[in-house]
Image: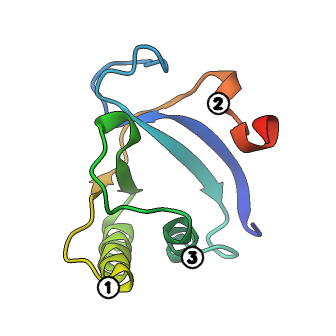
Amino acid sequence: MDGVIRTVVGYTGGKKKNPTYRQMKDATESILIEYDPDIMPYEDILVEWSRMHSPISKRKTQYRSAIFYADEEQKKIAEETAKAMKSALGVSKIFTGIEPVSAFYRAEEYHQNYLNKYR
């Protein structure tokens, strides 16, 4: 995607420092996206994410649906995205957390570029 500089698969949202796939505890698998907001705004990233994602079923913490925001503007955009997803899906509830960014820990190398490695 134009404007995306790099992505890193990892874990966030948990209390354990340096979680691993086998010892994740309360962390969530996530993707850190470094991007140029002049080329790819945060909102466009969330629109693309929402096209590839189904938030209508509740999942355990490891695989839960979540949007992480860095500031109040991003929080507002995340809330608007969640509302639009509900409307588009015709449901009254989705299971997507909207939370401030917290510590991020890079996942093991075999998780990086997973689709390219295992297609």
Q: Which mark is residue 44?
A: 3
Assess disc 2: are there few (<14), some (14-19) or many (≥20) residues with their C-alpha within 10 Å of its C-alpha.
Answer: some
Mark 1–mark 2 contact, CB under 8 Å?
no
Q: Quadrant of residue 61?
A: top left
Between 71 and 40, which is closer to the camera in this rendering?
40
Circle nearer the N terminus (3, 1): 3
Q: Which residue is disc 2 drawn over?
A: 111
Point out the frontmost of discs 1 and 2: 1
- Looking at the picture, how far across and down is residue 42, in whole percent? 52, 70
Q: Which mark is residue 87?
A: 1
Residue at the image point whose x is 73% and y is 43% from the top: 115
Point out the frontmost of discs 2 and 3: 2
Label 2, label 3: how far apart the Cα atoms are: 24 Å
Vertical comparison of 34 with 9: above or below: below
Q: Which quadrant is home to the N terminus?
A: bottom right
Q: In the rendered picture of this protein, how many numbered marks are placed on residues? A: 3
User: Element under label 2?
Assistant: helix
Label 1, label 2: how far apart the Cα atoms are: 33 Å
Query: Which amino acid type corresponds to the residue marked 3 in the rendered image?
Result: Asp
User: Element under label 3?
Assistant: helix
Residue at the image point whose x is 46% and y is 14% from the top: 22
- Direction from residue 4 to residue 60 in the image, left or right: left
Residue at the image point whose x is 30% and y is 83% from the top: 90
Query: Which amino acid type corresponds to the residue marked 2 in the rendered image?
Result: His
Between 93 and 71, which is closer to the camera in this rendering?
93
User: Element under label 1?
Assistant: helix
